[in-house]
Image (cartoon, rainbow, N blue to C red):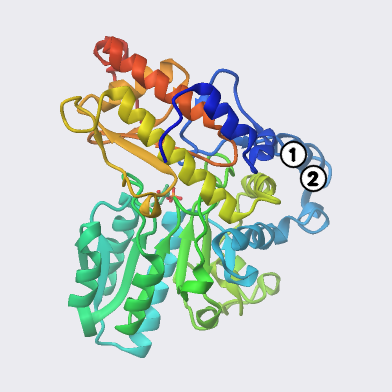
Amino acid sequence: MTAPTTRDACAALDAADPLAFARDRFLLPEGTIYLDGNSLGAMPRAVAPRMREAVEREWAIGLIRSWNDAGWYTAPQRAAARIARLVGADADEVIVTDSISVNLFKLVAGAIGLQRRRAPARDVIVAERGNFPTDVYVDASLARLLGMELVCVEQAEVPAAIERAGERLALVQLTHVNYRTGLIHDLPGITARTHALGGLVIWDLAHSAGALPVGLGAAGADFAVGCGYKYLNGGPGAPAFAYVARRWVGELEQPLVGWHGHAAPFAFEHEFRPAPGIERLLCGTEPQLSLIALETALEAFDGVGLDALRAKSVAMTTLFTELAERAVGGFDGASGFGLASPRDASVRGSQVSLTHPRGYAIVQALIARGVIGDFRAPDILRFGFAPLYLRFVDVWDAAEALREVVATRAWDRPEFLARKAVT
Ligand SMILES: *Cc1c(COP(=O)(O)O)cnc(C)c1O
């Protein structure tokens, strides 16, 4: 694709966009172009009235009765059923609960336990250096606790590390779409190769679910986790989700046992007996209001086809890559800017990442112009393109703002240099 050279041409793309209807489902601030939906999704309009109802009627008046009468108790399964469609799983293979970090702990420990029972000599976990830190922290902690060897390699080295582990391979733990670069791992290929060697795989779908089709079932995936507050728009700190392939559900023993994961929570038995189904991944009481917000937010995907979602995402990231390249005067080094995300859209998630030594200040200067992206140390400027609510004219305007920042060297201004706690 050669990028349109006018804003009007972008407006024409919006007029032809089959997903244009979905933007209206979001409350977006005037004058802001939000390219950070990969970090905290925008708010679906339906959430605010639903939260008012949940607080003022279900909590204040329904009180404890609302666990039954308002359906609070079964919200993890209802939200999960909506997510299942987005990740290509069946509803009874997904549950909404806790955070990614906590769910990873459960699944890594559970998967190692499965392997110990099947093949005790397998003692290697393959993970990725440069993955989102929480994933590697959890992998390393469990490797220490359970006496496994953690092999952490760069993304491109992952297939070779899996081969090298060979008969010692117990588990592969990867994020489908890299949070910094947006590079997509070959999920079906790595899953199949790991299985051929006798290993299991846990996929982190933080930057996949709600952004591109994942096809967990079709790939024969074992386990996965994913984020509720990024492309699923569940709100700050929204609960995450976990996926366990049906063939493993009954065998998986996870160590964070709690009463909500019991076969009969309200029998209050002395001994723990896991729930027969995916509910065994539950631990304590969910943050119910956050869960309700997520469940409601997921309605924004109603009627949205995943192929159309991916097509729009690819078109937007391709357009931004080309417009940004023009705006900064090339990615060849002379401009100071580089391109950290793949040019090949088939291996690029829903983000575009640039590099620049003054990246933090540039992102601040863009935010001052109403274009919200984010910065990831040491030098990455990250722009997420949530296909549900962004327009092609937003892509155009964002690139124009970047052009202005470059032309005025706004990154030298002192107010853009001070680092905030959350970048
Ligand atoms: C955002 C993100 C997380 C977040 O983990 P939480 O524990 O849910 O906050 C985990 N992994 C990846 C790859 C992420 O991008």
Which quarter of the picture shows residue 408?
top left
Q: Mark 1 packing: few (<14 Cα in 10 Å), some, or many (20+)? A: some
The reply to whether callout 1 and callout 2 are in contact (CB within 8 Å) is yes
Q: Is residue 39 visible?
A: no
- Name the residue located 33 percent from the left edge and 50 percent from the top edge: 132
Mark 1 element type: helix
Q: Position of residue 70 (x, y in %)?
A: 80, 53
Image quarter where the N terminus lies is top left
Tag 2: amino acid: Glu
> Where residue 347 appears, x then y in whole percent?
36, 54
Label 2: which secondary element = helix
Look at the image and tell me whether residue 407 can be seen: yes
| Left or right of 298 on screen, residue 361 | left
Label 2: how many Cα within 10 Å (few below 14, some 14–19, many 20+) = many
Q: Quadrant of residue 146?
A: bottom left
Give coordinates of residue 238: x percent, y percent: 56, 46
Which amino acid type corresponds to the residue marked 1 in the rendered image? Val
For label 2, being within 8 Å of ligand 1 is answered no
The answer to whether residue 166 is above or below residue 243 is below
- Please, is residue 347 above or below residue 28 in the view? below
Q: Quadrant of the C terminus?
A: top left
Identify the residue at horizontal 83%, vertical 56% (top origin). 69
Question: Distance from label 1 to label 2 (Cα)?
Answer: 6 Å
Task: Name the residue tied to disc 1.
Answer: 55
Which is more toward the observer, 208 or 126? 208
Q: What residue is disc 2 on?
A: 58
Residue in view at x 82 percent, y 40 percent: 57
